[in-house]
Amino acid sequence: MIPLAHYLIFSGLLFSIGLAGVLVRKNIIVVFMCLEMMLTAANVSLVAFSRAQGTAGIPVYDAQVLSLFVSGIAAAEVAIGLALIVAMFRSRKSVESTELTSLKD
Amino acid sequence: MIQNLPWLFLLLPLLAAVIDWVVFRKCSKCAAALSILSVAATFALCVAYLCGLQTGTPGIYTWMPVAAAQLSLHMGLVLDPLAMRMMLVVTGIGLLVHIFSIGYMKGDPSNLSRYFAGLSIFMFSMTCIVLADNLAMTFIGWEMVGFSSYLLIGHWFDKASAADAAKKAFITNRVGDFGFLIGILLTLGVFGSLNFADMGAKAAGIAPAILTATVLFLFCGAVGKSAQFPLHVWLPDAMEGPTPVSALIHAATMVAAGVYMLVRLQVAMGEAAFTGTACNVIATVGAITAVLAALMAVQQDDIKRVLAYSTLSQLGYMVMAVGLLAGEAAMFHLYTHAWFKALLFLGAGAIIICCHHEQDIWKMGGLAKRMPLTVLCFLMGTCALIAVPGFSGFFSKEAILDAALEQNPVFFWVGAGVAALTTFYMARLCLVAFCGSARAHGAEHAKEACPTMLLPLLVLAVMAIISGYGFAADSLVPFEGFHAHGFALGLPFYAGMGALALGLLLAFALYGCGKRSKDPLSGNAVSDALRNRFYIDALYDKVIIGGLQEIVAHIIEFIDAAVIRGLLMQGSAWLTARIGLLLSYIQGGSLRAYAFVCGFGLLILIFLLAFNL
């Protein structure tokens, strides 16, 4: 059996890659994808904890239910976020975050 | 309950003032009726007390405890003969002036409710001074009369000169009151009490120098209120107020409050407290005022101003008498002067109204034929003022001259000289205004005054004649143990007669029978100096207002410009703008920078939570 630490390290790496992507990329679609990656990292660690805390081969289902909720919210977020990105592309012909300066100017 | 009856002296006028002001604002007739009723009631009460009504000791109201039990400010009434007889003068003349006011103010466009409320508040404050049993209460009344005098001088406040005169009176009085307040605090310090009743016993054990300083500081209050040199400048200007107000406040009662207060102190502390420097200073100030004011009166053209300077000069007489340790002579003169000077002012008021608001004596003339009764009353007052034998002023002036001769002959000759000047300027006034023929339109059509004005004049004329005689003076002069001046032939009498004759001769020689239309004395440097009050007012204007006030104004302007406007207002605005500019760098508009800051902050939070810092 793979120990819990491996899952957590994997989850942490996934989260960090996601965060790095959010910070460094300009393309909003990529930023968005990286955000999804950070949510997935959280899901991974939730499920890992669920398995690790279980007794007699039965996991703690609370954590798995929570991860389902996270997935649900992520889906909703995608729906809204993609709609926003489409709307933005229609009005500006660009999805670069550096282009979003009309409030500043 | 009955022993608290004397508090009505204070409550009735106060109540009348409040009701006049709040309820009867629009109904001047109701206000006048109420004010007259209140003063008539206090007058009746006063007469009842003088006739022997006994109600026991009035209750004392503790107003403000200070420093635990050691001292408390309280309001108490003193009903000794000095106070009650002074009350008779105040309420008696007050009643007549109230009645006169109805006639004088008829048809005046200003708010008469305000006028009568002012008179009532004055009666209240004056009563407060007269009946006070301690200096704190005197001081409260002292400030209140100043306030009511301000209200009444400035009654026609839309006239710039009246508003200025009201301010001048108030501010000049503040100067004297400042000294008075120091005096009161000194009294508290050295006597340990402000009660007049406690002072006598303690005065003996106090160092003479401190006692002298206390008395002189208290005297400052009298210098302001009784308009003594060098604070005399407000009284002539106060003539901008309605004439009945001048009669009541600026001739008969309020300006005499300083003399009353000094005599009250002399009685309370004992004459020993006044001997030495204090005495000399007081007498000298009084003498200087008497001489200066009499000189200034010689060249005034405004009938009210002549009387105002004459009041100043007579107040100087009284203060001089106090300084000569002749309190009874001072109070005797205060008493007779109150009646005849009120008569002169009310007479002048009647003349002014009948000449269609003309105050210049050179535009009158021949009034004796057109309004004989008023002029006769005025002449009675004049005779009393210039001390014609048989009139009231004669006896009181003799009393002062007597005292002066006994104490210090210098003051005696000053007094005699002032008497000659008094005779001269009053004779000049009467000759110019009453004899000959009218010099202006207003005087040609003058008619006799209306009954509400004539009645008080007649009553006062009677008082001006009889108030010096024993039967009236013995029981009514505001001084305990007064003995009506026994008339005796002596130097004072001869000097007085000489002064009278000299003044009359000079006046007749110069002004004949009112045939001249112009003052033969005018047009030279001396006359100009007298007309311009020896340039004392101009000097104050230049030195105090021009010099001192300019400096203070510059300092205040600097504080305003540099500290308040520069540092506080513009400085704080500058600081806010700078902070805003600095903070604006944070909001760079870069989404990734925001995300970084957000993520970094999150990291710090997690770090803090994880390591329980």
Image (spheres, coloured by chain):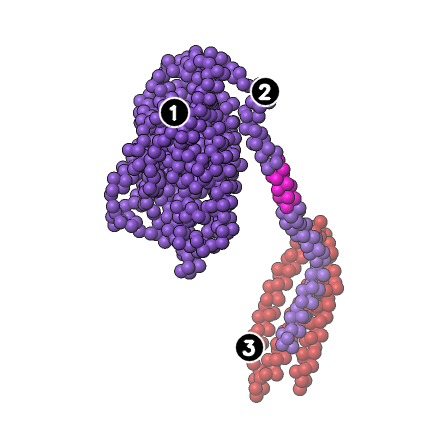
Chain colours: A red, B purple
Magenta residues? B546-559
Sequence order check, earlier mark of 2 and 1: 1
**Do discs 3 and 2 belong to a common subunit?**
no
Chain under numbered label 1: B
Label 3 is placed on what type of residue? Answer: Asp
- Label 2: state its secondary structure: loop
Query: Which of these two is toward me, B58 or B493?
Result: B493
Quadrant containing the C terminus of chain B in the rendered view: bottom right
Residue B582 numbered mark, or none = none
Give the residue pinned by disc 2: B524
- Estimate the x, y position of residue B193 in percent, counting from the top left: 42, 54
The outermost residue toward the bottom is A56
Q: Residue at x 51, y 15 (%)?
A: B518
Q: Nearer the viewer, mark 3 or mark 1?
A: 1
Give the residue pinned by disc 1: B388
Q: Distance between the residues labelled 2 and 1?
A: 32 Å
- For residue B538, say whether it is visible: yes
Q: Alpha-carbon neighbours of circle 1 within 10 Å: few (<14), some, or many (≥20)? A: some
Give the residue pinned by disc 3: A62
Chain under numbered label 2: B
